[in-house]
């Protein structure tokens, strides 16, 4: 029996440097037929779809102008009345001035008589103010004996006849003012008359000589009026 020589074993050799290792995907990938051996597959037709074009954006809503939608002024029935003639402002009440003739020595006595008649006629004691041009009234000295604080408190309370100097600097206004010209200069008496008239709301009684201004503004000498 003939003896055949042994075939040499072929061992799988590792790829040399620069040769990539075989991949499983390469083994499974179908082999591409050689050129001319088979009909190539027809390329698939891809239809390009145009991208949507954005349309015109709606304009943002503008806020309504102020006052829009409000009802306008309605016409008044019968038309707009025409303004009538302006009425004159009521005149300020005039202060009556009563003059009582008296010398400087008699002025205090005449003033006390005038105050008594005013109270007897129904006048409120708190509405009477007595001002002296010369020496203070005895009743003023009596009230000051209890202290100035108590004295000025009576002016603020207004509950009784108040006696003070004609040069009074504090605000004081009452319905009736009795001015007693029992001394002092003629200029001081005239100034006291003007200030006393401004403090009277209804009636000013002048006992004594207060100067030409008092004579021009005063009524004929006599009893003090009760109005």
Image (cartoon, grey):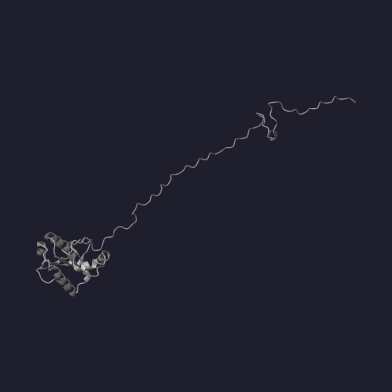
Relative placement, left or right, of 78 versus 68 is left
Which residue extends farthest front?
Answer: 145
Foreground: 147 or 16? 147
Q: Give x and y (percent) for residue 174.
A: 20, 66
Residue 112: percent from the left, percent from the top? 16, 71
Q: Is residue 11 above or below residue 91?
A: above
- Classify residue 23 by image quadrant: top right
Q: Is residue 24 left or right of residue 114?
A: right
Task: State the quadrant of the N terminus.
Answer: top right
Residue 88 seen anywhere in this rendered image of the structure: no
Against 190, residue 27 (above or below) is: above
21 left or right of 87? right
**Quadrant in the picture for the C terminus:** bottom left
Do we see residue 215 in this rendering? yes
Relative image position of residue 129 (x, y in whole percent):
20, 67
* Nearest to the observer: residue 82 or residue 11: 82
At x 23%, y 68%, the residue is 142
> Splitting the image into 4 quarters, where does residue 80 fall?
bottom left
Residue drawn at x 17%, y 73% as measured from the top left: 116
Furthest residue to the bottom?
120
Residue 108 vertical position relative to residue 61 in the rendered view, above or below:
below
Vertical placement of 28 versus 227: above or below?
Answer: above
Number of marks in the image?
A: 0
Query: Picture coordinates of residue 16 (x, y %)?
Result: 71, 26
């Amino acid at each position: 029996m003939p003896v055949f020589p042994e075939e040499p074993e072929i061992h799988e050799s590792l790829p040399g440097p620069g040769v990539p290792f075989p991949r499983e995907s390469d083994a499974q990938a179908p082999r591409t037929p050689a050129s001319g051996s088979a009909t190539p597959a027809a390329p698939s037709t891809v239809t390009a779809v145009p991208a949507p074009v954005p349309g015109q954006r709606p304009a943002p809503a503008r806020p309504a102008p102020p006052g829009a939608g409000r009802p306008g002024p309605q016409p008044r029935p019968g038309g707009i009345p025409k303004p009538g003639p302006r009425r004159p402002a009521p005149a300020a009440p005039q202060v009556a001035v009563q003059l009582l003739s008296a010398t400087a020595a008699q002025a205090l006595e005449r003033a006390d008589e005038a105050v008594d008649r005013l109270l007897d006629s129904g006048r409120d004691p708190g509405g009477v103010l007595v001002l002296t041009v010369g020496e203070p009234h005895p009743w003023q000295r009596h009230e000051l004996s209890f202290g100035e604080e108590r004295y000025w408190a009576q002016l603020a309370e207004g509950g009784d006849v108040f006696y003070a100097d004609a040069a009074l600097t504090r605000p004081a206004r009452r319905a009736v003012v009795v001015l007693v010209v029992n001394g002092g200069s003629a200029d001081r008496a005239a100034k006291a008359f003007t200030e006393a008239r401004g403090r009277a709301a209804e009636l000013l009684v002048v006992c004594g000589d207060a100067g030409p201004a008092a004579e021009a503004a005063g009524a004929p000498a006599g009893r003090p009026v009760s109005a």
